[in-house]
Image (cartoon, rainbow, N blue to C red):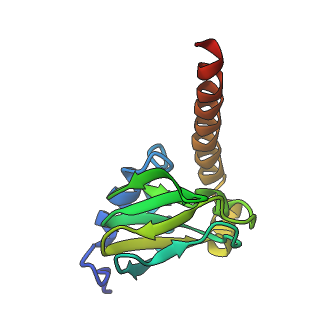
Amino acid sequence: MDTQAVTGLLLIERVLLLKSLSIFRDTPENILAEIVHLMVEVHAQEGKVVVREGEPGNCMYIIQEGKVRVKKQQQLLATLGEKEFFGELSLLDTETRSATVTAESDCILFRIDQEPFYDLMESRPEVVRELFKILSKRIRSLNQQLLEPASR
């Protein structure tokens, strides 16, 4: 059985990539091995819009190589690079994208689509717990950031 992707990443290398992400850090390797099978390789050339603010979302992306810019209404929110991810909220709902993400350089991304991820969540509730943990941390961090200007 050929476990190599076009990028040459073996199954175990993809598991290690997932393990390096905060969203999957505490997820057991056997479950990560199942998530690996959901990963679809996507190439984005420099300047390509990967997701557009206001459009419906139904997947998340993991950056294997390259960098992307995250903008909301032309304001730069972040620059993300290798072993970072975006669009994770779209694994949970189909609301519109909150920002536009553009490839800052040629990128190799892995896309995880919502429907197959839903199927995995049904059989593996641990995945849901880890996703909720990371989202809760982000909400707490945002709440803290909102409080900081008021306390100055």
**Residue nearest the observer in this picture, 108 or 92:** 108
User: Is residue 105 something one can see in this rendering?
Assistant: yes
Looking at the picture, does residue 36 appear above or below residue 7? above
Give the quadrant of residue 139. top right
Q: Residue at the location (47% across, 43% down)? A: 26
Left or right of 35? Residue 5 is left
Residue 99: x and y in percent read: 60, 60
Left or right of 43? Residue 150 is right
**Residue nearest the observer in this picture, 33 or 62:** 62
Looking at the picture, does residue 44 appear above or below residue 60? below
User: Is residue 36 something one can see in this rendering?
Assistant: no
Give the quadrant of residue 45. bottom left
> Which quadrant holds the C terminus?
top right
Q: What count of labels does the image hold? A: 0
> Which quadrant holds the N terminus?
bottom left
**Residue nearest the observer in this picture, 70 or 112:** 70
